[in-house]
Image (tube, grey):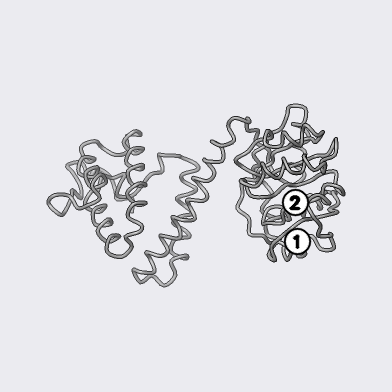
Amino acid sequence: MGVVGAGRVGPALAASLQLAGHRPVAVSGVSDASVRRAASMLPDVPLVTPAEVLARAELVLLTVPDDVLPQLAEGLAETGAVRPGQLLVHTSGRYGAAVLDPARRAGALPLALHPAMTFTGTSVDVQRLAGCSFGVTAPDELRLAAEALVIEMGGEPEWIAEADRPLYHAGLALGANHLVTLVAQAMELLRTAGVSAPDRMLGPLLGAALDNALRSGDAALTGPVSRGDAGTVAAHVAELRRHAPGMVAGYLAMARTTADRALAHGLLKPELAEDLLVVLAEGRDTPDGRGRPGGPDAADGESDR
């Protein structure tokens, strides 16, 4: 086994496969951080060029950034580094197996195994792979081999069609990458409001919200948007303009999307939505400066704050 690209993902997958009996023989890395990471997670494994990794290994992990992968596959094939029968595994979420077509034409066996997990670049990542879902794409004749590698790493294979890889990756990025941004912004606002430990305050709340969302989908929506509390939302927008103007556009975009989904699923009553949609459309207070904190049916249920 060899690794081309000692970023956060490659060494973790290699270390996991090593536990399953595969023998790491070579790794490539360019930056100082990559070199240190390789030395820490794959000790005593030689650091060589990408071409030398392919020369030494039967199974090669291509763990490079998405935008680099097509050129890497083409370059390795053109320079004759690829050997017939060699398993080439990339970990890009965006691409399926077709991105490795230049190497496949040279005789390689292409696999796309994308772990649906964020990585720290430390040994904790190996433990997190247990139960992690992998987006798997490969030619039909290699499907069993691809799924076996995932299982060896303790993961759960999830088959993704070649044409669906960009949509699959968009779903993961929307959920995971944007979540980090939202949480970081929430902590920043809480600090500004005087909360000394925003992480401790948000932890139970966000944990419960995530659990509810995974279990119930849109039925888990709560908060002023789903209730139609236009006055509260207007106050939020006003405070954000005062203290964090860079967050206003994101808040409004997410609130509009939340309102649309709440309306579609019958959670937001149409009679309460009018003033709310005015606030969200214009990004300002309602005309009377107060909005509508509730309507004639506002007392029908308990507050979900």
Instruction: Point out the residue furthest to the left here.
Output: 288
Q: Position of residue 209 (x, y in %)?
A: 45, 50
User: Which callout, 1 or 2, points to the residue nearer the camera?
Assistant: 2
Corner quadrant of residue 169: top right
The quadrant holding residue 217 is: top left
Q: Where residue 13 sits in the image (x, y, percent)?
A: 73, 51
Q: Which of pointers 1 and 2 lies earlier in the amino acid sequence?
A: 2
Q: Amino acid at mark 2?
A: Val
Q: Depth check: give the residue in front, 183 or 96.
A: 96
Q: Tally the numbered discs.
A: 2
What residue does disc 2 label? 4
Q: Residues within 10 Å of mark 1 (few under 14, many from 20)?
A: many
Q: Residue at x 80, y 39 (%)?
A: 87
- The kind of residue tagged 1 is Ala
The tag on residue 204 is none
Residue 29 location (% of width, % of height): 73, 58
Q: CA distance from mark 1 to mark 2?
A: 11 Å
> Is residue 17 left or right of 282 when viewed as pictured?
right
Secondary structure found at label 2? strand
Horizontal relation, residue 281 to residue 15: left or right: left
Q: Position of residue 123 (x, y in %)?
A: 71, 61
Residue at label 1?
38
* Quadrant location, the C terminus: bottom left
- Is 66 rendered above or below residue 7? above
Q: Residues within 10 Å of mark 2 (few under 14, many from 20)?
A: many
* Residue under the image location 86 percent in, 47 percent down: 55
**In-front residue for pair 77/214:** 77
- Seen as rendered, the residue at the extreme top is 140
SS for tag 1?
A: helix
Q: Is 294 on the left-hand or right-hand side of 118?
A: left
